Image (spheres, helix red, strand yellow):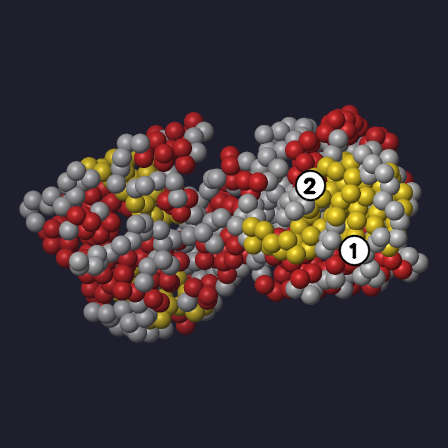
Amino acid sequence: MKEKPFTIKHILDIAGLSPDQITYILDTAESFKEISTRSIKKVPTLRGKTVINLFFEPSTRTRASFEIAAKRLSADTLSISASTSSVVKGETLIDTARNLEAMQPDVIVLRHSLSGAPHLLSRHVRASVINAGDGAHEHPTQALLDLLTVREKKGEIKGLKLAIIGDIAHSRVAHSNILGFTKMGANVVVSGPATMIPPYIEKLGAKVTLSIKKALQGADVIMALRIQLERQNKLSFPSIREYATYFGLNTQHLALAASDAIVMHPGPVNRGVEISPEVADGPHSAILDQVTNGVAVRMALLYLLLGSESQ
Amino acid sequence: MNLYLKGARIVDPSDLTGETPVLIKTKALYDIYIRNGKIAFIAPQGKEPIPAAAKVIDLAGKIVTPGLIDMHTHLREPGEEYKETIATGCLAAVSGGFTAIACMPNTKPANDNKSVTEYILQKAQEAGLATVYPIGAISKGLQGEILAEFGDMKAAGIVAVTDDGRPVMNGELMRRALEYARNFDLPVISHCEDLTLCSGGVMNEGSVSTQLGLLGIPAVAEEVMIFREIRLANLTGGSVHIAHVSARSSVDLIRQAKASGINVTAETAPHYFSLTEEAVAGYDTNAKMNPPLRTTEDVAAVIEGLKDGTIDAIASDHAPHSTLEKDVEFNMAANGIVGLETILPLTLKLVHAGHLSLYEAIVKLSANPARILRIEVPSIQIGKKADLTIIDPDRKFIVDVHKFQSISKNSPFHGWELKGKAVMTIINGRIVFDDLD
C-alpha cells in the first residue's frame, strides 16, 4: 500500500514541522495557486467537509483568507468571532469546542490571544486544529505563506539572509518565521529596541543585533513587524515618533540591503511607523504577494489535512 | 489499642545537640511499645517481652521517624471546599506520612482574624487526623495595607503570619510586621515576589517562555524581594522565613545572610528540586506554579542549598485546584500543585541520589519545620506522644493522582515511578494511615 504523504493531524506550530513537511506544504500550495486565477475559482475537493473558523481575536485578513481557501475547495465554512461566541457568557474554550465538535466539523481554525490555546483545543476535539495565531507563540500559516513568497521570489530559501525588524517579543509571526526560515537553511537576524528582544531568542535559531543597520546589511529579505500597540506595556519605547525614527524601515535603511531585496510585512501595516509608505508601496515590496499566497497555503493545508485522506 | 512496633530502624533528629541516645545513631533495630497514645518503652529488638493485648506490627526493613510536619499547606476551607476541605487535606497529609500541617491563610475569607483561626481548628479537630497549625495573615484581607490582629490570632492558635500567595509589596508594612510579630514570638513567612518585575508573567523567563510565547517571570523578581526581607530582618531583629525558594540567586542571598548572622530561615518545595521549566512544554498547566519552575542551574543550586543547610526545610506548598482552574488556557490557569502525597517520595529521591542522608531529609521534614514554627519538636522518646511516620525506603510505586486522598488531582508527577514512601502514620498512638504490605 502506498504510504500517505502527509499524516499530520493538526497544524499547531512550525516547531512541529520537519523541513520535508514544509517543502511538501509549499509544493502543494504552489499547485493550488492556479485555481485562484481561474474564472470559476472553485474545485470540488473538499465537498461535504466543514471548516469552522473560531476567532477569539479581531482579524480580517487571516479569517478572510481561511474562508476563501475553504470555499475554493468547496468546503462548508462557518466563522465565529469572540463577540458572537458564548465566551462572553462565561463558557470555557473547551466547552465551546465540545459544542462545536457535536456539530461534526472536520477542521477548526483557531485564533486566540493566549499562547497554547490551539494545543489545549487539539487535546479535546476529534477535528483537526489549525493554529491561526496564538498569543505571542506562533502563527504557522503566516510563516508558510512567507516561505512560499520568498521561495517564489528568490528561487530557494537556503543561504538567504532574512532580517526581522521590530517587536520580536510580542510577535508570533517572528517566532514562526525564525523557526521556519532557519529550518529551511536561511540565516535569520533579528533587530529592534532591546526592550522588544526576548531573552534566549537565539535558541530559536536567530542571531540578535541591536544595530538595525547591521541587521539590514546585505539582507535578501526584510520583514518589518507591526508594532502591536495593544500589547505594549508602555515601557517598551518612549514614543511612536522615536520608534519610527530609529526602527522604522525607510528608503535609507533599504539601501543597506541587497539590491534585489524583498520587503515583507505580515499586516496590517502602521504606515509611517514600522515602515514608510515609499517602502511599503515600492518595487521591493512583496506585501500583496504574501496575501495572495496566504490563500494558496491555507488551501494546501486544508487539502492535506482532509482531502488527501480520501486519495 | 496499644501498639508494638517490632524490629524497626529509628531515625530521630529531634535532638541535634549531640546528646542523642546512641540508639538513634546506629543501624540497630528496636522495638517500640506504644501505650495509651504514648511511647512506653524503646528497646533493642527482642529484649523486652511483648505486652499482652498489644497489636504487633512487624517493621522489618522499615524506618520509624518522628511525625513529619508540612509547614506550607493550602487547605481551601473556608471558601473553596470543592478543591479541598480541612478534612480531606488532613487525610492527604496522613497518607503522605504527615502527622501535622501548617495551613496558609489565603482562604475565603482569609485567616486574618481569630474567628477564622478558631473555625479552622474546630474543623481540624472534627476531622481527627493530622494536627493542624493555622498560619495567620500579615495584612487584613491579604490586601497588603493594614496589619492583621497578630495577638488575637496567636491567642486563638496561629503559629506564624504570612500573606502567602502574594507578596507584601509595601516595604514599610513588612517592616512593621517583622517588628510587631516580635511581641508575639511569631515568625513572618514571606512570599518573595516583586510584582512590578513580573508584569503578567506566567512561567520562568527564559528560553522556554520565549519558545512558547508566554510572558516570563525573571528570577530577579524573587531575588530582590529576598534581599529586602533580609535587610528588614536585620533592621528589625524579627525572624523572617523565606517560602518556596526556587532560584539560584535566592539561595546565594540566604546563604550570605545566614553567614552574617541575620535571623532568616528558608524552605523549598519538591517541585523546585525535581522539575525544570521544561515541564511547561506543551502548555501543561500542572507545571504552572508561583514561583515558577526554573532552570537546571537553579535546581542544582536548590539541592546545594539543601545540602549545606542554607535551606532549612522542605515543604509541600500543597495547592489544590480543580479542573475548572487547571483545564484551561495556560495564562488563565491557577498556580500550584497538590504535594502532600508526593513530598516524601520526592525528598527520598534526593536521599537515593546521595544528595541528602536520610537523617538530613527527616530533619528538613520534621524537626526544622517545628523549630521554625516554634512548636514542639516531635521525637521518639519514652513518655512522648506517639506521633510517628513509618517509611519503607525501598517501596517502588507509580504516582497515580486518582489514588490521591486530596480532592484535587493537579500534579505534574502523575505516572512517575518513585522509590520510598510512608507506609503507616500514627497519631497519638492511633493508626490513621496504613499501607503496610
Task: Please report contact status of discs 1 and 2: CB closer than 8 Å, yes or no.
Answer: no
At horizontal 44% and vertical 48% (from top left) the residue drawn is A115
Number of residue marks? 2
Foreground residue, A112 or B8? Answer: B8
Amino acid at circle 1 = Arg
- Residue A111, above or below A89: below
Foreground residue, B66 or B252? Answer: B66
At horizontal 32% and vertical 35% (from top left) the residue drawn is A101
> Along the polypeptide, which appears first: circle 1 or circle 2?
1
Which of the 4 image quadrants contains residue B350? bottom right
| Observer able to see residue A172 | yes
Q: Quadrant of the N terminus of chain A?
A: bottom left
**Is disc 1 surrounded by few (<14), some (14 to 19) or many (20+) residues within 10 Å?**
many
Q: Which mark is residue B434?
A: 2
- Chain of the residue that carries numbered disc 2 in the rendered image: B
* Apparent side of residue B433 relative to residue B32 in the rendered image (left or right): left
* Residue matched to label 1: B9
**Residue B370 % position (x, y):** 82, 46
Amino acid at circle 2 = Asp
| Real-space CA distance between mark 1 and mark 2, rounded to the nearest whole angstrom | 18 Å
**Residue A271 % position (x, y):** 33, 52
**Residue B397 % position (x, y):** 58, 51
- Residue A258, above or below A192: below
Foreground residue, B356 or B316? Answer: B356
* Apparent side of residue A193 relative to residue A32 in the rendered image (left or right): right
**Residue B251 % position (x, y):** 71, 60
Name the residue at the left extreme: A39
| Observer able to see residue B305 | no
Q: Secondary structure at mark 1?
A: strand
Q: Secondary structure at mark 2?
A: strand
Which of the 4 image quadrants contains residue A257? bottom left
